[in-house]
Every structure is written in structure tokens, then in C-alpha cells.
Amino acid sequence: MTPPAPRRGQGLVRPYVVTDGRAHPTRNTFDLVTLVIAQYDRPLGGLSPEKRRLMELCLGGALSVAEIAGHLALPVSVTKVLLGDLVDSGHLITRAPIPSAQLPEAQILQEVLDGLRARL
Amino acid sequence: MSHHIPDVVSWCLVAVLVAVAVLLVRQRGITAAVRRRVAALEDGLQTRDTEVRHLVTVRLPAVTASMHQPVPLPGLLDERLGGTVFAQGLQSVMDLFTQAVDKAQARADQSAKAALKASMRALQGLAHEQQLAISDMQERHDNPDVLRDLLQIDHANSQFGRRAQAIAVLCGSWPGRQRAASPLTDVVRGATSRIRDYRRVKVHNHADLAVVSRAVEPVVLAVAELLDNAARHSQPNTSVEVGLQPVHNGACVVIDDAGVGMNAQEVQRAAALLSGQRTVDVSRLGDPPQFGFPVIGVLAARYGFSVSVDTRSPYGGVRAVLFLPSALLSQIDLDGPDTTPLAPPARPGAPARTPTGAVRPPQHRAPAREHPEPAPDVFPPPAAPPADAGAVTGSTAGGLPKRRRRQPAAPLPAERPAAPSATVPDGPPAPGPAAAPPERTAEETARRMGAFARGTRSGRAAGTGPAGHPDPAPVDDEGNPYA
């Protein structure tokens, strides 16, 4: 799906104004394919214009982070900051499309550590 | 006979004495007159000497000084010289000197402006280029630490670009960038992007108005200068409040700060600068140079908005009001492609159909995609206001101008004939859509519309009548009885 060309004048509102100077999202749970779903019952008043547009986008159904960034014509990392805020305020919920990988067992790690200690 | 001689001698003596006395008296009078004349001439000479010295030491320096601030020029020292040839000579010396100073000043100002303008345009180009590079990097890097640094660089670069732009505008350049018509909210936030303390700016009342394409960059620059003034002259822990208010003849951007405010003299000077009537001399901006108000004045005069700063803010500082007349505003196009992103994307080449059924040519969005290009070329505004939407191709029978779409869609020939029949509700005896509709008179159009309305009403009455809904009084929606 090709993102539509940004209708707004690009480069007019700079990303640091959009995120209010923040670069780190409040949570580190987003990647490009994380699906985002809007909560319908949240009021949209008091949101910044970008957040409002993001909510309007997501009210149509689940969207991935990459798609949202494309529609908003914002860098993905900036979009993640906005998404983090909206998840914190309860406007959005996320669903990870990929199950998290199995962590290696503690026993194996312990054995590797012991082996390394024995060698060095 | 001899006794007469002494008489004669004495008479002669008396006569001679009398003559000598008369001569002496006369001589004395002449001498006194000559002495008076000499004294008067000496006095006149001295007065002229003093006058010449006064010219050199006071009057000519005053002419030079009056270049920097207008002061009344001193006149002659001695009123007695008024109207003499000497005074006229002095006056012509003054005039020549004034002209020479004026000319030299104008030439210096012009060359300073030309040099500043050229160098600032070069810097502006570099700032745009750098902004594009930064935007690319922001797209490419996903690491928040990198993004944080990029945001800082971006912020510094935006301020740098604004400074260069302001000086270039003051030197007679155009703002250097053509943008698409943008919502007023974005215009104000764009201005916020370009000042140092952008986090202190709070924008309220998001108005549904857009600024037309040619005014976007000037308004952004003017609002940025006002916001910068507001933030610079207030405490770092206070906020700068921005309100957007639609008013009868346009819209206002109201900027309140909680700073030190301005006294009456400063307000007067600011009003003179903001009116844009006075030509601004780049060499007289003070040290450090104050660009803000002169730049706003130049922009306001050139693009037709107005700015006033003469109101006291309720927060104690200055309230700056930027008034945009309706000519510089348009309504936000709510049917734009952005608000319906989940509709199936238009096939390339096929016309994008908006929910209202209006057909948009696909080229409509193409110019917006070219905007990040560095060259400050003039792009055609993608969202043109209806006033210049197309060339007038003729007029209807009622005298209204007929316009044609500015960008005739090339792949649309199959769609175009259907469009009029879909939007114009023709009466039952409607001609075929393919036939070129002949020119209708206003009466005929009204008759057809009336026939259509009567037909639909009678159809509805026929459908609901038997179910117990009698036809209401034959009065239309506006309360006018049917003829």
C-alpha cells in the first residue's frame, strides 16, 4: 500500500514541535509491524493535531506503525513517540503480530558462564 | 586809509575762521559717518564670519546627524542676515551638502542591502538543503538517541534559516519558499518550529481555516518573529499563549506573553515600524540589530495583513494581534484525501473519487509531492482557492462567469460527459447527456427545477397517501406557497 502524498505542506511543522522535543517513546514496544487499534470511547479533545489525525486514521481499524507513519508523513521514530503517548493515555491498544521469541534457558547460560570462567 | 587795514584783516580772519569752522564741522560729520559705516561693515563681516563658522561647526554636522534620526535643522545664527545674498549662498551650500549626504547614504544602503541579500539567499539555500538532509536522516534512523540529536540539529537549523530569511526579506527579497495552502494551525505551529523556546508556546482554539498558498511563508515568518519577541522578553518559566480567532473579515492570531511589556515610546516606535510605510535602512537597526518589527512591517505591507502590538496583555506583557483578511484565507478542504485514508486507494491514472462524488484529476496531488525539493521554485498551488480556479471561458445566460477546471484531467474523457447529468437534477423532459446542452435561460431552469420538485412530491404523496399520511399543505421548505 503506497502512502498517499502528504497534502499538508511538508516541512512546515518540524518533528520536534510534533513531539514537544522528545525523541524517546514512553514505551519501547513498537516496531514497524506492530498493529495499533483505537479505543472508540476516548474523547479526542485536547489532543494535538497530529494525534487527532492519528486517531482518525486508526478509528477505521487496525493499522501498522509503518502505515500510520506513512499516512501522517512523519518519520517512524517520531510516530512512535506519539503512539507511546496515546497508548499511555488509553486512546490506543497495541497487538504484537509476532510472538515473542523463546528466551534461552538459565541453565544453558549458566553453563556457558562456567565454561568461560574455566577457560579464562 | 591805513587804519582800515586791521579791520580788513580781522574781517578776513573772521571769514577764514568761519570757513574753517564750517569745514571742520562738516569734516567731523563725515568722519563720524565713515566711522559708523566702518563699524557697521566690521560688524557685518564679523557676523558673516560667525555665520560661516556656525555653518561648519553646527549646521552641516546636524545634516549628517539627521540621517540617523530626524531632528529639526538649526537655522541662521543672526536673524539680520535673513534674505540677503549671503544667506541664500549659505542655504545653497546646505542644500548641496544635504543632497550629497542623501545620495551617499542611499548608495551605501543599496549596496549594503544588495550584499546582504545575496549572501542571505545563499545561506537560505544552504539551510533548506540541510533541512532536507536532516529530514532524510530522521526517516532513515530509528534509534531514539540519534533522533534526539537530529531534532536538536533540526531545531538549530530552522532558527538559522529564519534569521537568514528575515534579513533577506528586509533587504527586499521574497520569502524564498512557496508552499501549498496550509491550515492556520499548521502555519502557527510552523512559526513555533522556528524559534528557540518553542516548548513554551501553547496554541489554543484550532480554527478550521487555511491560509492561501502565497501567504503561508510570509505569515509563518511574521508570526515567528512575534513569537520570538514574546518568548525573548518574558521569563523562561512563563508560557506564550497563542489564540486563533475567526473574525468577521478574516482571522486573528493573538499572541500573549507575560513579559516586561513596552512603554508608550516603544509602542509608538513599534507601530511606525509595523505599518511598513517607512523604508527601512539596514544600517539603522541598532546594535545589536533589531530585525523583528521592520521585517513584519515589510511583509505586512507587501502581502496585505496587519499587525498591532499596542494592547496590554492580561498576563502583563504585550498582546500582539496579527489580522489576516479574508482574501488570504480559505476553508480547509475536509474532503481531501487525508481524511479518508482507509478508502481503497485510487488506481494510478483513474480519477480519485471523494465522498462527495466530485471528480478530482489525479494531477491534483502531484505538486505537493515535489515540495521537499531544495530549489525555491514557484510551484503551482495544489489547493487553489475557488477565485482563481480557472480561466473564464464565457458566461451563462444569467451573466455569471463560466470557468473551466484549471488542470483538465487527461485520462478523463469518458468521465466528463457524465458529470453534469449527475449533478444537475434535470426534469423529466431532460435531454440526453451526450447532446450538447443548449444555453438555458434562468426561467427555464427554474421551471425545470419546479417540475422536478413537484414530481418528486407527488410521487412521495402517492406512495405514502394510502398509508394514512395525507399530503401536507402544499408549501415548500421555505414557507412559500406554490403558485
Image (spheres, coloured by chain):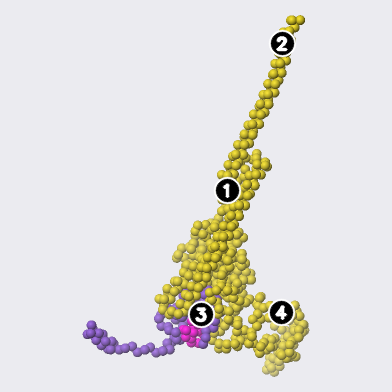
Chain colours: A purple, B yellow
**Nearest-to-viewer mark from 4 and 2:** 2
Taking depth in this image into account, of A15 and B59 the one nearest to the observer is B59
Which numbered dot is residue B62?
A: 1
**Rendering coords of residue B5 (x, y %):** 73, 7
Circles 3 and 2 on the same subunit:
no
Q: Would residue A64 be counted in the magenta stretch?
A: yes
Residue at 71 percent of width and 16 percent of height: B16
Residue under pointer 4:
B393
Separation of residues labelled 3 and 2 (CA atoms): 134 Å
**The magenta stretch spans which residues?**
A55-73
* Chain for disc number 4: B
Residue B5, visible in the rendered structure = yes
Mark before the other along the chain sequence, 4 or 2: 2
- From the image, tell me which residue sits under label 2: B10
Placement of B233 over or under B358, stated as above or below: above
Q: Which residue is mark 3?
A: A73
N-terminal-most mark, 2 or 1: 2
Q: Is residue B33 magenta?
A: no
Mark 3 burial class by Cα count in 10 Å: few <14, some 14-19, many 20+: some
Between the C-alphas of marks 4 and 1, the distance is 63 Å
In the rendered image, residue B115, in percent from the top left (x then y), is placed at 54, 62
Which dot, 2 or 1, sits closer to the camera? 2
**Residue at point 54%, 81% (across, down):** A5
Q: Could you tell me how far apart the alpha carbons at marks 2 and 1 are, in whole angstroms? A: 74 Å
Amino acid type shown at disc 4: Thr
- Judge if badges 2 and 1 mark residues of a common chain: yes
